[in-house]
Image: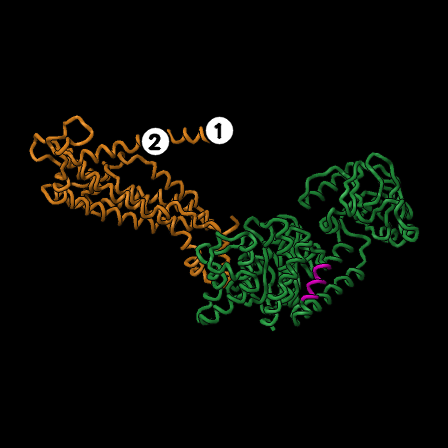
Amino acid sequence: MTSTKSKVLWGIVTVLVAVYALFPVASILATSFKAPSDLTNQKFLPSPGRATTGNYEQILVGDAQGLFLTALRNSIGICLISTFIAVVLATLCAYAIARLDFPGKKLVLTTALAVSIFPVISIVTPLFNLWRSIGLYDTWPGLIIPYLSLTLPISIWTLAAFFRQIPWELEQAAQVDGATTWQAFRKAIVPLAAPGVFTTAIIAFFIAWNDFVYGISLTSTEAARPVPAALAFFTGASQFEAPTGAISAAAIIVTIPVVVLVLAFQRQIVSGLTQGAVKG
Amino acid sequence: MASITLNHLVKKYGDGFPAVNDVSIDIADGEFIILVGPSGCGKSTLLRMIVGLEDITDGDLLINGTRVNDKAPRDRNLAMVFQNYALYPHLTVYENIAFPLRLAKGKHSDEEVDRLVTEAAATLELTDHLQRKPANLSGGQRQRVAMGRAIVRQADAFLFDEPLSNLDAKLRGQMRSEISQMQRRLGVTSVYVTHDQTEAMTLGDRVAVLKKGELQQIASPRELYEQPRNLFVAGFIGSPSMNFLPATIEGGVLRTALGDIAIPAEKAAKAAGKKVVLVGVRPEFFEDAKLVEESKRGHGSTFRATLSHTEWLGNEQYGYINFDPAPEVRELLNNLAKDMDADELRPQVVVTLDAASRIRGGREAEIWLDTRKLHLFDPETGVNLTRDEAAGAALTEEANQERAEEIANAQGDGHSTASGFASSNTGGGAPAGASAGGSSRGGATAAGGKHTS
């Protein structure tokens, strides 16, 4: 009785949350197929017969191509590099934190936490001045470094938590079985840590991918401007035309990699690979 | 195969607390040694020092006469079975067992690896599961995979760290007898850590009892049981455990809370000069006076007491007698209970009575006590005043000879192997499930025997 009742209740809640979360996405998707003159039709969907892929053509092969595609290239490059650096550094750091007892261990973790909760907006202005004077303004490294300050702390925390769950007996068992320290790490720990590293990399990538404040403040040209910032520079075909359609299309396109990543690594993200290592 | 010598081993942690303090044990080739003690006694630390996962602060560890203190675990050629099995979850059962062989690069060809793994799997009845992942195995199967990883290597010695503590009671009995048979068959030196005294008593050739990092006594299970060196060993070994009764000595008579007990003159002589002693009496030393044969009666003395209640178990029954000790003795008993990981209990004496006894709780009854077997302990030092060194040594020597015979039997042909199992099973008092396991393994055993010879 209660179980059916609670199931129904849960179902309703789930639907409500899903609608609430997905409505804006659906709205943007619908808008991205509206022609500029159709934007004000006051309906959710494009007017019948007037749906168009014009917005996509505009940003991928049309006028806004230069603006969007270079921004996309910048975004992908900058995010991949900062994710890679963050994950490599965080892996080493988290392994040490989870595994060793050394003075200052708490300090490292607290500092990481402090950095991650520090308001971004308050350091943007000083960074802007500093970057201009040392020549990092409007360059890839000029964005990668601040992105690291966003991605590194969360990577350290996630990975440290993950490493703590790996039974260290495995490493010791490998050593007793005849492995060197490095072999034990590579053959017993790395295969188990891989899902955690994947998850962390994806989280770090999203954080960098979604950044807007650094992207708009520390760039001035197409040399380094990432997509979220570039969207603000879209203009309509004339000053009387709103660029809403093109912006929507661009937003949909930049959402695709995120969705693809999550779907592709879903198994790794929720993986219970350590199950069975020790008593279940 | 190897002998292992622990020479005054000490392990101190950063705060200077000695987890293991001056432990010396000589482990002979092929011997099965049990390290037992309450939690925190340093038994696991000691095992990890032997295998090389913990540094040795002081003292020497010798394997086959060579000092190995500074050798890495992989250079000691020991195999270890971990408490939680430590299987590699990303590898199949086959690859888990093959792991140590693959690490020894170039030593084994692929065919050889395959042969060794198949053999080990057959011995452990894992052949059907070779392609499965550890996550899909039951507890007993995981345990066997962990064992397979140890036996496939032909290591010098096996180290077990509470390998059965994660299994349910029935499986534990079965695995216990399997480990025992495997050890005899391979004749491999083994060190086994446990806090379960059934495992300690049934598996070990010799049992080392540890308390707070210090070795209390190392002897055969029988010697520990019959000739304990001190209060701690006496109380730790045996279930239900030994009763300790405070008593004053007057001539040949012990004045206890249960009444006066006359003891043999030679026991009284050993306690001469002590005013107060603790009398150690195992529950089975008691009997319903009505059921004691005339011929035995003279070896003990009787007293009258009122049992608070009895528990009938079918083959025997337990009776409980409450008594009220003096405050200072009560504290001593409480400390003893704490040492042994037990809760502070109301002081009571447990007596084992024949199942036929009609004594029931609440009624006063006459109880007979075999005074030949009781022990007297010094309440201050805990030393057993009535320990008979020679008798104890004889018991341990006997166990040594039995081991040699059992190994010879187990490694001989199939017939003698089977009979060897039968005797070891009955001797160890293994449960019915265990002996069933033993008989069904006859075929696999014979194969194993050929392999080692």
First in sequence, mark 2 or 1: give its number: 1
Q: Can the viewer see residue B76?
A: no
Q: Position of residue A182 (x, y in %)?
A: 42, 60
Colour orange, chain: A
Q: Which residue is mark 1?
A: A1
Q: Position of residue B316 (x, y in %)?
A: 79, 46
Q: Which residue is mark 2?
A: A15
| Residue placed most toward the observer, B317 or A176 | B317
The chain holding disc 2 is A
User: What is the span of residues highlighted in magenta in the rendered image?
Assistant: B418-426
| Residue placed most toward the observer, B3 or A22 | A22
| Residue placed most toward the observer, B361 or A163 | B361
Classify residue B151 as left or right of residue B195: left
Specify the farthest residue to the top. Answer: A42
Q: Separation of disc 2 and disc 1 at Cα?
A: 21 Å
Vertical side of B363 occupied by A81: above or below = below
Q: Amino acid at mark 2?
A: Val
Q: Position of residue B227 (x, y in %)?
A: 78, 56
Visual hue assigned to chain B: green
Q: Can the viewer see residue B111?
A: yes
Specify the farthest residue to the bottom. Answer: B453
Vertical side of A25 occupied by A159: above or below = below
Can you tell which mark lies on residue B439? none
Q: Amino acid at mark 1?
A: Met
What secondary structure predominates along the stretch shown in magenta? helix
- Graded by Cα atoms within 10 Å as few (under 14), some (14 to 19) or many (20 or more), the crowding at tag 1 reads few
